Amino acid sequence: MKARTALLLGLLAGAGQAQADFYSSYLKDPEDGMLDASQYLSQVPLGFLPVPAPITEPAVGTGLAVMGIFFHESAEQKEQRLTAAGGNPVLPKNISVVGFGATNNGSKGGGLGHLGFWKDDSLRYKGFLLYSDFNLDFYSLGNLNLDRPVELNISGPLLLQQLTWRVPDSNWFVGGRQLYRHVDASLAGGENAPTLANPVLNERLQAFLNSDLDRKITTSGLGLLLEYDSRNNPMGPTLGYDYTLQYTRFDSAFGSDVEYDEYHAEGLNYWALSKQFDLALRMQYDAVDAGDSQRLPPYVMPAVDLRGVSATRYQGEQVATAEVELTYKLNRRWKFNTFTGVARAADSIGDMGSASSITNLGVGFRYLIASRYGFWMGSDVARGPEETAFYIQAGSVW
């Protein structure tokens, strides 16, 4: 018995020492002794960064998502031993993401993603393949605004691909994009259709549900984009600018059941105010145009994109958003942020001035989890007009 006990203690001691050696070799920064996944992600085969993320998105309820982020370096990059403190962060040749999640309202989904920075960052690729089975509350259906939401089940695959080419010796990128989405839309509550007190509105609602639900819809589009990107690190920028213009055409020639144009313009601005303070500003405009004869599915309509605001709460054919964030850097590892934003959603540019303003306010923190890549993780708490939401953030939030 004593021999077995001694053997067990020896095995436990050996396992503990092995864990301590692994932590010291791969998860401890020799510069400051803090937790850092740089060596683990760059040297351990199949090493990945696990990201458990509680879901508090008001549109789908509460739940949990789990992601794994893989960093793939080139052979030349693996020979470098460069950290953010000793020079510029390494931009991996490829980054892969896999994840899945579920919430308490029955929503669930999963997918794969890939980011490529190829040929010394002269080519950039972004691709995502997702499958979702979401129960979402919509307050706008077929140009009908509702005081109480209608819960729809939106299920099916989505494929997004984007490839851009850098204009030589510049910060300009040009490229194309593809978006394919096949959706089976139905009432989340089953056969019992919702009713409205106003008989006229109720008749319009029932007509929309009868004509546009319980059917499969494919939206397939091809587009062009122009981008100016001078950020110091795409994964965790603190300086520079990123301005993007996108135009996507959804057409029967590409296999789309509905035809419309989609526009997106975004400007991201990052400034260093001092050694301790950084300032960032996001400006965004989204629009769709289907002409007078086409009624679009509710899930393709632009929506207000602000932390703390339900993803489908405020929609319109035109949506304008601005958000500002102030960051205080406590030290090399820790920083704290506060942010606020405003957005408006309308059915036309002319209506934008009279539309109601939707605002948010929040605070958060970030920890430099992988200094080699300038990669931060943390969380935000944001308050919107109706609810408060909690987010786990990995990388740049914009």
Image: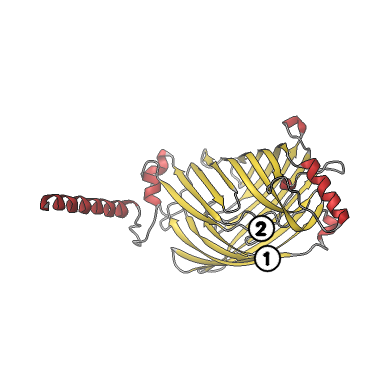
Residue 228: x and y, percent?
64, 49
When the figure is inspected, residue 327 is found, relative to residue 292, above or below; the finding is: below
- The spot of residue 151 in percent (x, y) is 70, 51
| Along the viewing direction, whichever of 359 and 281 lies nearer the viewer | 359
Q: Amino acid at mark 1?
A: Glu
Residue drawn at x 85%, y 49% is 204
Rate crowding at label 1 as few (under 14), some (14 to 19) or many (20 or more) other CA atoms within 10 Å. Answer: few
Mark 2 vs 1: CB contact within 8 A: yes
Q: Position of residue 306 (x, y in %)?
A: 65, 59
Q: Quadrant of residue 271?
A: bottom right
Q: Which residue is mark 1?
A: 386
Residue 255 position in % (x across, y down): 72, 31
Residue furthest to the front? 192
Question: In the image shown, does 270 or 192 lie closer to the viewer?
Answer: 192
Q: Quadrant of residue 172?
A: top right
Q: Which secondary structure, mark 1?
A: loop
What residue sits 51% from the left and 69% below the top? 276
Which is nearer the N-term, disc 2 or disc 1? Answer: 2
Instruction: For residue 353, say whether it is visible.
Output: yes
Q: Is residue 207 left or right of residue 103?
A: right
- Circle 2 crowding by C-alpha within 10 Å: few under 14, some 14–19, many from 20: many
Residue 247 is marked as none
97 lies above or below 324: above
Q: How is the image coloured?
A: secondary structure
Q: How much space separates mark 2 and mark 1, taking CA atoms?
A: 9 Å
Residue displayed at 77% across by 53% down: 140
Which residue has dot 2 on it? Answer: 310
Decide if residue 81 is in sight here: no
> Left of 361 or right of it: where is 24?
left
| In front of the other: 123 or 140 | 140
Q: Secondary structure at mark 2?
A: loop
